[in-house]
């Protein structure tokens, strides 16, 4: 008679360990996939939020300590041919007159001569003069304090100069009067060049600001994720510049 076999038949007396098998796909799904998704997100967040914050702090520090002003002045004084920035030019047709009046034996007489001539005026900023780059903490932007605008000697086109008598007078030498006017031409044009600065100031302001942004700022901060923005540019002789400086000084003292 056959004896029934128990459930432990063939066992040596010790249970065999049970091995849990998990496929690599399930492991990747649980661990690898979230990592693949999370890592790019962290990198993006770092570049988008943390780097600009660091960059902004470094930019602010560079301006507040005067480093940028020093670097700018040092550079422009060392580079040959970069001492002047031509900020604007103006071509005009100038008319200059000279008049004399004399009295002989109770008789009044007068004469007047005129020069009609085309003139080119050029205006520039001296890069070696005093410059300041000030950081405005209120909107995290830069205010540039630039030197005053200067002018080169006006360039009259002598080949197109027209000299004529406007009025002739008894016993007055118009030839000498014309010669005197031509001798005074350089001085009179220089006076007019100074007066024309107000006509070209806004053009000069725009060109100077553009020059600093494209030449200096973009090169100085080319490795920064965030570049400083110029809020405004003032010339030394602008009426409001002293108030701007006082305002910035009060902010820095807070």
Image (cartoon, helix red, strand yellow):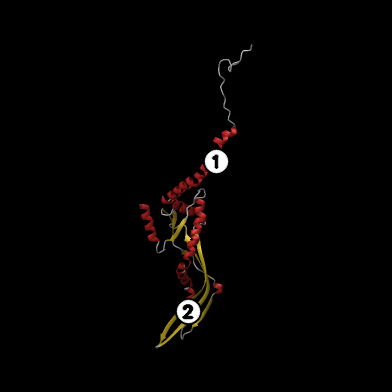
Please rate how many residues cluster around mark 2, counting C-alpha atoms within 10 Å: few if below 14, some from 14 to 19, many from 20. Answer: some
For numbered disc 1, what is the local secondary structure? Answer: helix
Residue 78 spot, x, y in % from top left: 49, 53
- Above or below residue 242? Residue 43 is above
Residues 138 and 162: in front is 138
Query: Which mark is drawn over residue 232?
Result: none
Q: CA distance from mark 1 to mark 2?
A: 89 Å
Residue at position x 37%, y 54% from top? 251
Q: State which tag comes first along the sequence, 1 or 2.
A: 1
Residues 27 and 159: in front is 27
Residue 118 visible in the current orientation: yes
Residue at position x 45%, y 80% from top? 99
Q: Residue 37, located in which quarter of the rendered image?
A: top right
Quadrant occupied by the N terminus: top right
Query: Which mark is drawn over residue 177?
Result: 2
For numbered disc 2, what is the local secondary structure? Answer: helix
Q: Residue 158, located in which quarter of the rendered image?
A: bottom right
Residue 224 spot, x, y in % from top left: 50, 48
Please rate how many residues cluster around mark 1, counting C-alpha atoms within 10 Å: few if below 14, some from 14 to 19, many from 20. Answer: few
Q: Residue furthest top?
A: 1
Q: Residue furthest front?
A: 1
Number of marks drawn: 2
Residue at position x 44%, y 85% from top? 109
* Of marks 1 and 2, the one in the foreground: 1
Residues 66 and 232: in front is 232
Q: Are marks 1 and 2 in contact (CB under 8 Å)?
A: no
Q: Which residue is mark 1?
A: 37
Residue 10 horizontal side relative to residue 81, left or right: right
Residue 51 spot, x, y in % from top left: 48, 46
Residue 128 spot, x, y in % from top left: 46, 57
Residue 151 visible in the current orientation: no
- Above or below residue 226? Residue 90 is below
């Amino acid at each position: 008679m056959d004896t029934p076999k128990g459930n432990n038949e063939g066992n040596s007396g010790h249970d065999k360990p049970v091995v849990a098998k998990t496929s690599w796909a399930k492991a990747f799904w649980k661990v690898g996939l979230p990592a693949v998704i999370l890592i790019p997100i962290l990198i993006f967040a770092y570049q988008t939020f943390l780097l600009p914050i660091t960059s902004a702090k470094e930019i602010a520090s560079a301006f507040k300590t005067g480093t940028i002003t020093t670097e700018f002045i040092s550079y422009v004084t060392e580079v040959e041919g970069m001492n002047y920035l031509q900020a604007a030019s103006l071509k005009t047709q100038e008319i200059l007159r000279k008049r004399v009046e004399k009295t002989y034996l109770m008789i009044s007489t007068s004469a007047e001569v005129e020069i009609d001539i085309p003139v080119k005026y050029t205006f520039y900023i001296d890069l070696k003069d005093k410059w300041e780059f000030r950081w405005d903490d209120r909107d995290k932007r830069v205010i540039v304090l630039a030197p005053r605008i200067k002018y080169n000697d006006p360039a009259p086109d002598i080949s197109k100069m027209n000299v004529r008598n406007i009025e002739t007078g008894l016993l007055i030498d118009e030839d000498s009067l014309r010669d005197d006017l031509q001798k005074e031409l350089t001085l009179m044009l220089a006076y007019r060049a100074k007066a024309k600065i107000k006509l070209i100031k806004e053009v000069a302001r725009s060109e100077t600001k553009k020059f600093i942004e494209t030449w200096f700022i973009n090169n100085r901060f080319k490795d920064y994720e965030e570049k400083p923005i110029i809020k405004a540019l003032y010339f030394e002789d602008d009426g409001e510049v002293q108030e701007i400086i006082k305002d910035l000084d009060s902010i820095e003292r807070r």
